[in-house]
Image (cartoon, rainbow, N blue to C red):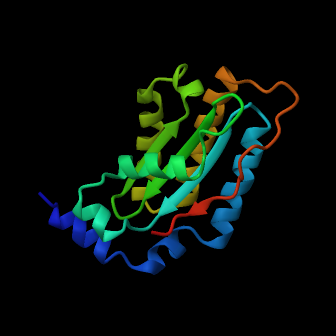
Amino acid sequence: MVNMKRWFRHAFMPPWRLRMSFSKDVLERIEKAIKHSEYQHRGELRFAVEDALALGHVWRGISARQRALEVFSNLRVWDTEYNSGVLIYLSLADREVHIVADRGIAKCVAQAEWDAIATAMQEEFRRGDFLSGTLQGIDRITMLLATYFPGNGSNPNELSNKPVVVKH
């Protein structure tokens, strides 16, 4: 059964909403935060934001979590030497954040810890503070990655630090 309320949220998500919430300056600051984060550990962070899903996805009941897994795969976050890639995915229409960790880090960090970070980010986003929410999430993820995948002096950048605005 199609959730019509969700379908309407995705169908009528104004395109300016994403640009307003994640301006060029905000995206650049997120990129710098990711770069700074990666100096402290051997993990790789990606940040992706999507305003709305394709309506066919919504009609078929694809959840924001399922979409996050798809974006994780499409961005090849799994393709790192230590299997320590982490994706922060935000669906504006669903008002949800999902953090997907590759198998190397998922062995060390319980999903509940990622979910707690995502929930804290969502709280900031509800207040309209997308930059602060994202930077706080990156800081908390950095602490986890530094604990389980500490830097060893050599950490080549395997994935782009540039935030991705996902187009459907």
Task: Tell me the quadrant of the picture where the C terminus can be found.
Answer: bottom left
* Residue at image location 52% in from the left, 75% down from the top: 20
Is 101 left, or right, of 159 in this rendering? Answer: left
Q: Which residue lies most toward the right here? A: 153
User: Residue at 56% of width from left, 51% of height from top?
Assistant: 134
In the depicted structure, whether residue 47 falls above or below residue 100: below
In percent of width and height, residue 41 lies at 74, 31
Residue 35 pos. (x, y %): 76, 48
Q: Is residue 17 above or below residue 45?
A: below
Say which of 154 and 124 sits in front: 154
Q: Quadrant of residue 27?
A: bottom right
The residue lying at 68 percent from left, 40 percent from top is 44
Coordinates of residue 95 in the picture (x, y in percent): 36, 57
Is 5 placed left or right of 78 in the picture? left
Quadrant placement of the N terminus:
bottom left
Q: Is residue 129 visible?
A: no
Above or below, 118 against 43 in this view is: below
What is the x, y in percent for residue 4? 16, 66
Q: Does residue 121 appear to the left or right of 153 in the view shown?
A: left
Residue ID at (63%, 30%): 83
Whether residue 61 is visible to the viewer of this picture, yes or no, is: yes
